[in-house]
Image (cartoon, grey):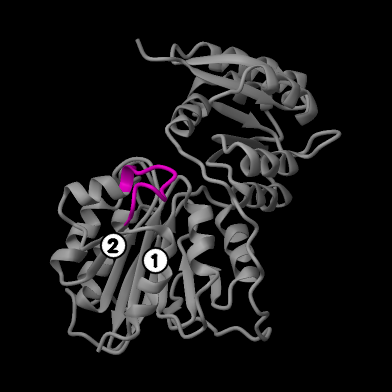
Amino acid sequence: MQTKIRTLIVDDSAVVRKYLSTQLGKDPGIDVIGAASDPLIAMERMAAAWPDVIVLDVEMPRMDGITFLRKIMSERPTPVVICSTLTEKGAETTMQALAAGAVSFVTKPRIGLRNFLEDPSNDIAAAVRSAAAARPRVVARTARAEVRPAAKLSADAVLPATGGALARTTERIVAIGTSTGGTQALEEILVPLPRVTPGIVIVQHMPEKFTASFAQRLDSLCAIEVKEASHGDRVMPGRALIAPGGRHMTLLRNGAYYTVEVIDGPLVNRHRPSVDVLFRSVAQRAGRNATGIIMTGMGDDGARGLREMHDAGARTVAQDERSCVVFGMPKEAIKLGAVDAVLPLDEIPKEILAVRQVA
């Protein structure tokens, strides 16, 4: 018989604690072992019985959720689901929490909270189940990179797509796809990169309104420019474009240059943005001028797209199991024969820099 997922709820709202306990308790695979009103009480509970997953609010009395999260991740890494209110301020706070080691999040509305908590379709139980499969690692603080001048490169206008991959050019593309655990992993690979890095396009599974804050945070840490992609942005050396939450991103080609297209569309592999959508466009329009990298994440999004990149002549890489929070996406790509190399996370920056050396 499968062991239930021992879950601890930490939230200063009695209403949230009550309804989360009720909803999660209805799931036959979840055992709510406690609910605490702040992190200090939670630590007392955890001393007696350590949970498999923690559902954590961010703004709480006596100790904020991020401080508590950092303490957990530095001492005994445990899967944490952030359950926070969706505001601009909250979005930035959530990005800090993900960088500190949280594996996923659920957004709480400011209005209609009780209805949201009572609604079984709000995916809180699914988030807990996914988090239970994660293997979080000790998170170390990242040193800030050298601050670049304030001037930023402007975006080019979007241009029509070409049909099929073209011959190798000096313009090189690195396409990255990731999900659970990807916020930490992306920080670890992007921060060390110098400004001469090839152009990078990224899909990180994340809802709308969060990707802008995530990109801004990475931009403040990195020597390269990191931004949430806009329709028509040029993919160029020293720039990483992150697909906006809630929209797909594809690569376009005009002569020797690449741009991105940001589009609406149906969910693909249950995601929008989808890694497969990006990887397939890179296969078609960049071919062997590209490198594809699939990293930590639940599910199989990106596996088929990476295979298309591989078949089009691109170099393809998967993050190894040991360094993944969740090995699902890389594992599926490896099973499909889509991967040329399996590398630990700390070797991926060197792989990206090797791209610029290819003739």
The residue at 48%/56% (across/down) is: 185
Residue nearest the viewer, comparing 179 with 117: 179
Quadrant for residue 217, please give it. Answer: bottom right
Indicate the amino acid at tag 1.
Ile
Q: Quadrant of the N terminus?
A: top left
- Residue 159 in sight from this viewpoint: no
- Residue 341 in sight from this viewpoint: yes
| Residue 47 versus residue 190 in the image, above or below | above
x%, y% of residue 304? 21, 52
Indicate the amino acid at tag 2.
Val
The residue at 51%/81% (across/down) is: 194
| Residue 86 versus residue 45 in the image, above or below | below
Q: Confirm whether the magenta stretch covers residue 321.
A: yes
Q: How many marks?
A: 2
Q: CB of mark 1 within 8 Å of CB of mark 2? A: yes
Q: Of label 1 and label 2, which has the lower sequence position?
A: 2
Q: Confirm whether the magenta stretch covers residue 299.
A: no
| Residue 303 versus residue 174 in the image, above or below | above
| Residue 317 image label | 2
Relative side of 127 to 266, left or right: right
Quadrant for residue 148, please give it. Answer: bottom right
x%, y% of residue 277? 30, 57
Residue nearest the viewer, comparing 277 with 351: 351
Element marked by disc 1:
helix
Q: Residues within 10 Å of mark 2 (few under 14, many from 20)?
A: many
| Residue 348 image label | 1
Query: What segment carries the magenta color?
Result: 319-329
Relative side of 201 to 167, left or right: right
x%, y% of residue 158? 40, 78
The secondary structure that most of the magenta stretch takes on is loop
Q: CA distance from mark 1 to mark 2?
A: 8 Å
